[in-house]
Image (cartoon, helix red, strand yellow):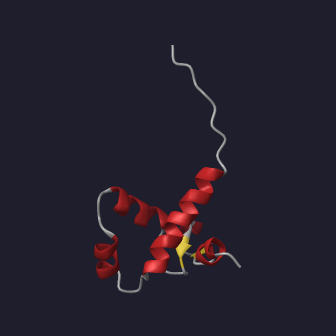
């Protein structure tokens, strides 16, 4: 099993938790929440300190999940005007 697949197994979906948004290991911490925090400049170290239930592998899993989602996108040029 590849490292990427192992990481992606940390991301789960449960319709009864956060309305089915992708979450980390069944916790009430969403992939979206972590991505927004990272985009806002919060460091991995800060996240791990603020959320002691998180592991560094969880943060890698969030990034792997986002990369997998983006890789599946079809992008079409849009003309403005």
Let me know if residue 28 appears in the view: no
Name the residue nearer the viewer: 46 or 25.
46
Name the residue nearer the viewer: 28 or 2.
2
Left or right of 29 in this view: 70? right
Q: Residue at x 54, y 59 (%)?
A: 66
> Quick one: quadrant of the N terminus?
bottom right
Q: Residue at x 59, y 68 (%)?
A: 20
Q: Position of residue 26 (x, y in %)?
A: 55, 81
Left or right of 51 in this view: 64? right
Residue at the extreme top of the image, as rendered: 81
Left or right of 1 in this view: 44? left
Q: Position of residue 48 (x, y in %)?
A: 34, 79
Q: Residue at x 48, y 77 (%)?
A: 58
Left or right of 42 in this view: 4? right
Residue at the extreme front of the image, as rendered: 2
Q: In terms of image quadrants, where is residue 79?
A: top right
């Amino acid at each position: 099993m590849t490292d990427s697949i192992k990481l992606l197994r940390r991301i789960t979906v449960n319709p009864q938790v956060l309305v089915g948004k992708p979450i980390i290991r069944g916790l009430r911490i969403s992939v979206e929440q972590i991505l927004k925090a990272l985009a806002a400049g919060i460091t991995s170290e800060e996240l791990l300190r603020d959320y002691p239930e998180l592991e560094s592998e969880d943060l890698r899993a969030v990034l792997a999940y986002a990369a997998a989602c983006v890789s599946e996108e079809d992008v079409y040029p849009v003309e403005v005007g």
